[in-house]
Image (cartoon, helix red, strand yellow):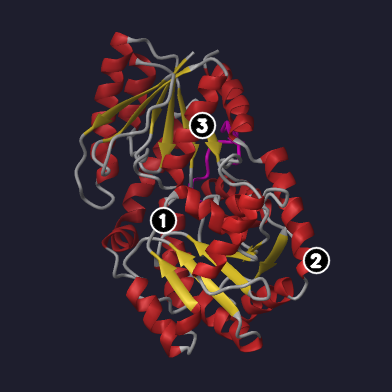
Amino acid sequence: MHIAMLSGEYPPRWGGMGSTVFHLSAALVARGHRVTVITRDGGGGSPPVQDGVKIRTVRWAKIPMAFTRSYGKYALADLIRLHSEDPVDVVHLHCPMISWNSRQFQACTSKVAPVISSLHGSWLGERDGLLTARRQREAAVWANPNDLAILLTAGHYARFEKAAIQGSKICVANSRATKEDFVMRYRPPEDWDCEVVHWGVDTEMFVPIDLNDVQSIEEKVSIRQKYGVDESSNLILAVGRLAARKGYGSLLKAFAKVHATDSNTTLVIVGRGHLRKRLLRQASRLSIGSSVIIESGMPFEDLAMLFRSANLVVYPSYYEGQGLIPLEAMSSGTPVVTVNHGPLPEMVDNTVGSLFKMGDVDSMAESIILELSNPDALVLKGEAGRKRVLESFTYAIDAERFESIYLRAML
């Protein structure tokens, strides 16, 4: 079948949504389908080439939140043109970074094909995450224009999420927590057709250290030495955009407690964003500045190597639709410590890491210290995490599930 995917992110915009659409498209092509992605232009480079996947770009207004409406408008017009040139069998929207009203959903259904809407999370949930970050005194909660726009306009843009519920043939939430969030906020009809399909990760990129491969072991030693960490020390890794909602301020407070118990522990944070200088100043005030490194970014191969070279990955986010970082860690054979809130417990439990109370610095510190205190258990949890990802969180599984959903929508 010919699947049209509309996504506000696609490489070179390597956000969680962009990565998901990229890999899902390839997995669908591997099952014999054709995929056309309509995304925003720009992004700092050309989209990567994938056999069987065509990329079309449209313009958009570079205004926080409002881009979802302008991109949605131009994407719909281009979708109709695409359908006239090469008929589309099903349309797959990736919400909430595209905002259609009820008339636009009707136009798509009548002029093109039935609509499947993936729910990656809600704007109201994003706003709640920001408000939680403010209560937890995270640094510069409103310094980011995008975050400020979410705070001020999430209620307005929520109506387009409600339109997605009403205008889609089938909705697909990326976690049970996301589905429950939409049910609570928008009270869909009892016959609402919504499935839960967790996104997978790239299990060929994110792999464990091969203990039988000398080069793999040497690379691990090298990257740990880069951060001043030897085999007798611990390397903690945190990955994600440097934004208040991600909880890095609380992580630094928790790490100060961890560092007080073992001064040979190092925290590496990898992420782009406006908070880098503020977080480094906070680390200095907590007297852990020499043990905290913040990388603005690195090639995927290096990041994957860092994942499998760390002793532990910590993910303290206040809100996620699903959250892919824990799965990337698990796929890399590295245990995860994350919050006991939202979708995270759907992926992480005490067999692959541990959970702490969201926003509780003491709980986070205790979980980290407990995990690092038992290296043998960490190895077993890493192995269990890799096994869980291969069994439940791959793009091949996602493609099979979506193929079934597409076929049902076409009936």
The stretch of residues the image draws in magenta is 185-198
Given contact means CB atoms under 8 Å apart, are the residues at marks 2 and 3 in contact?
Answer: no
Residue 282 in picture, x, y percent from top left: 41, 83
First along the sequence among labels 2 and 3: 3
Nearer to us in this view, 180 or 244: 244
Q: Is residue 48 above or below residue 1?
A: below
Residue 196 location, quadrant: top right
**Alpha-carbon span between mark 1 and mark 3:** 23 Å
> In the image, what residue occupies the spot 42% across and 89% down?
285
Residue lying at 42% horizontally and 74% vertically, measured from the top left:
134
Q: Earlier in the sequence, mark 2 or mark 1?
A: 1
Q: Secondary structure at mark 3?
A: helix
Q: Which mark is residue 298?
A: 1
Q: What is the secondary structure assignment of the residue under circle 1?
A: loop
- For disc 2, the marked residue is 376
Count residues near mark 1 (Cα–Cα under 10 Å), then give few for <14, some for 14-19, many for 20+.
few
Mark 1 or mark 3, whichever is nearer to me: 1
Q: Which comes sooner in the sequence, label 1 or label 3?
A: 3
Residue 363: give its label: none
Q: Which amino acid, mark 3?
A: Leu
Which three-letter amino acid code belongs to the residue tagged 2?
Asp
Residue 376 placed where, x, y %? 80, 66
Tell me the residue that label 3 is attached to: 24
Tell me the crowding category of disc 3: few under 14, some 14 to 19, or many 20 or more residues within 10 angstroms, Cα based.
Answer: many
Q: How far from the left and from the top, in percent, is residue 131?
A: 43, 69
Separation of marks 2 and 1 at Cα, in angstroms = 30 Å
